Amino acid sequence: MPKSLLVFIFIFLILVSALFANHQSQKEQQVLAPTPLIDFSLANLAGELTPISKWRGKIIIINFWATWCPPCLKEIPDFITLQNEYADKNVQFIGIAIDTPELVADYLAFININYPILMAEIEGQQLAKQLGNVVNAVPFTLIINADNEIIFRHPGELSKTKIRQIIDPLI
């Protein structure tokens, strides 16, 4: 067998292994035993400090996002739709922007978001890590049940279908 073919096969196997490991890592993050949500407070765009405990007792979907992140911006219209659908079912979406207030305000001027946006700036990556974002991905989404327990973590883009699969049994 030619040496170049062996090198190609070796590189191919390494790439496949890396992709499988990444997929397994994301899969493991999704389904975990419920863990209590830590209490934290962040400012909204008006600068008012808002504790996450404000929504205790609701099913909460927390989404870490940024204006420079195309998958984040792609998710937002779906979150707006879902917030409308589930508004009367004790479900609350919350966006946590890992960005500057100026960039977020500029973006929000073009889209009518119907859920709270809290500001974490770059420190939001550390908060996301504390909440289980071990791969430091953006977007990063958490689903918290009405007992204030994190029941789902997901790095990367998340579909409406997947969110419905998780929150419908909780309602």
Image (spheres, rainbow, N blue to C red):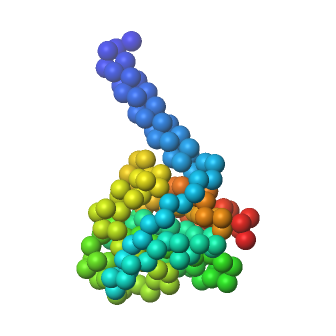
* Above or below 90: residue 140: above
* Vertical comparison of 46 with 92: above or below: below
User: In this picture, is 84 found above or below 36?
Assistant: below
Quarter occupied by the C terminus = bottom right
Residue 35 higher or lower than 18, as above or below: below
Q: Is residue 26 visible?
A: yes
**Residue 101 place in picture, x, y as percent:** 28, 77
Say whether residue 88 is left or right of residue 65.
right
Residue placed furthest toward the top: 1
Q: Splitting the image into 4 quarters, where does residue 73 fall?
A: bottom left
Q: Is residue 62 left or right of residue 2?
A: right
In front of the other: 108 or 88? 88
Instruction: Please name the residue shown 43% across and 77% down the image.
Output: 50
x and y, in percent, of residue 31 in the image: 61, 49
> Which residue: 57% across, 57% down?
36
Query: Residue at 50% across / 84% down in the picture?
Result: 114
Estimate the x, y position of residue 104 in percent, counting from the top left. 32, 78
In the rendered view of the protein, which quadrant contains the N terminus? top left
Task: Depth check: give the residue in front, 27 or 17.
Answer: 27
Quick one: 98 or 126, which is closer to the camera?
Answer: 126
Q: Provide residue 152's location: percent of width, then percent of height.
A: 59, 56
